[in-house]
Image (spheres, helix red, strand yellow):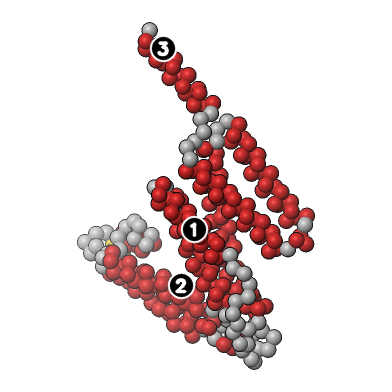
Amino acid sequence: MFTPGFKYFGGLAAFGLIAALVYGLSSGDATGPDYFGFVDRNAIVGLISLGWKGNVGAASGFIVLIFMSMSAALVGGTAVAFRDADVESVAELGDTPSVMPFAQRPTAPSWWPAITAIGVGVLLVGLVMDTKAYWIIGLVLLSVVAIEWALSSWADRSTGDATTNAALRDRVGASFEIPVLGLALGAVLALSISRMFLWGTGNAAVLIAGVLSVVILAVALLAVFKPQIGRRTISAIVGVVAVAIIALGVVTAVIEPRVGHHGDEHGEESHAESTVEGE
């Protein structure tokens, strides 16, 4: 069940965690309140909160051991997910488990270069406008693209069978990419829509909300009542709509907000105040 790589890095992660616990307990304040005559009370709180509260002794040593444990756990999880790149384990997913198919060049189209361009654009807009939210979103998009592109490249070259490659990619990536990408896309869309609402005032904001609602409802109804269209077509439509909303959010964030009835009311109040002061 567990590969040799997972056993090695799992053991290293456990060793780092135990060493960090022992280090935090043994290097605490010896003169403070303690349990059993030698265990520092504040060290218990520090170990539970990983140094956020309490005392873990010398913080540098504790941090090194904790990060060593986390890194080893990450590498071990990756090793067991990819089965240590073992030929026999990968071949079991094919039609002939005893034979490892030849590798092939990627055959499916990739969206990741286009998404990379979008991430770079959002990052540059954030840097130029000095808007922290946008350049953080750009960095997140580029990080996601780096992981997904590498995963797709690995799967496309794993075997000579496209079906087996797709099964490998879904087995490794689907467990985390769907919730993470959905959450990231939702955050970016929410920020973009908020920029539109801040740009439009009064009737313009109502019109923007109505158009967005109609578009989202139309895509949802299309996916429900026309399942024969196919998952790839629906994904392409959703991607085009999302890119359009993000682009409009960037544009409305760059240009100045419209002056609506709020501005007129503010101007009338200012005029009334100036009149009273003049009297």
Q: Position of residue 219 (x, y in %)?
A: 70, 52
Q: CA distance from mark 2 to mark 3?
A: 69 Å
Residue drawn at point x = 41 percent, y = 12 percent: 275
Query: Are the residues tagged 2 and 3 within 8 Å (C-beta)?
Result: no
Please tell me the numbered disc located at residue 119: 1
Tell me how far mark 2 sits from mark 1, CA to CA.
26 Å
Disc number lying in front (2 or 3)? 3
Residue identifier under label 2: 74
10 Å crowding of disc 1: few (<14), some (14-19), many (20+): many
Q: Residue drawn at (54%, 61%), measured in percent from left and top?
A: 115
Q: Can you say whether 236 is above or below 257 in the image?
A: below
SS class of the residue under badge 2?
A: helix
Q: Quadrant of residue 232?
A: bottom right
Q: Position of residue 270 (x, y in %)?
A: 43, 19
Mark toward the start of the polypeptide (2 vs 3): 2
Residue placed most toward the observer, 50 or 34: 50
Residue position for label 3: 275
Give the position of the C terminus as an image quadrant: top left
Q: Secondary structure at mark 1?
A: helix
Q: CA distance from mark 1 to mark 3?
A: 51 Å
Circle 2 crowding by C-alpha within 10 Å: few under 14, some 14–19, many from 20 = some
Instruction: Establish if 238 lies above or below 92.
Output: above
Q: Residue furthest left?
A: 31
At label 2, which amino acid type do we have? Leu
Q: Nearer the viewer, mark 2 or mark 1?
A: 1
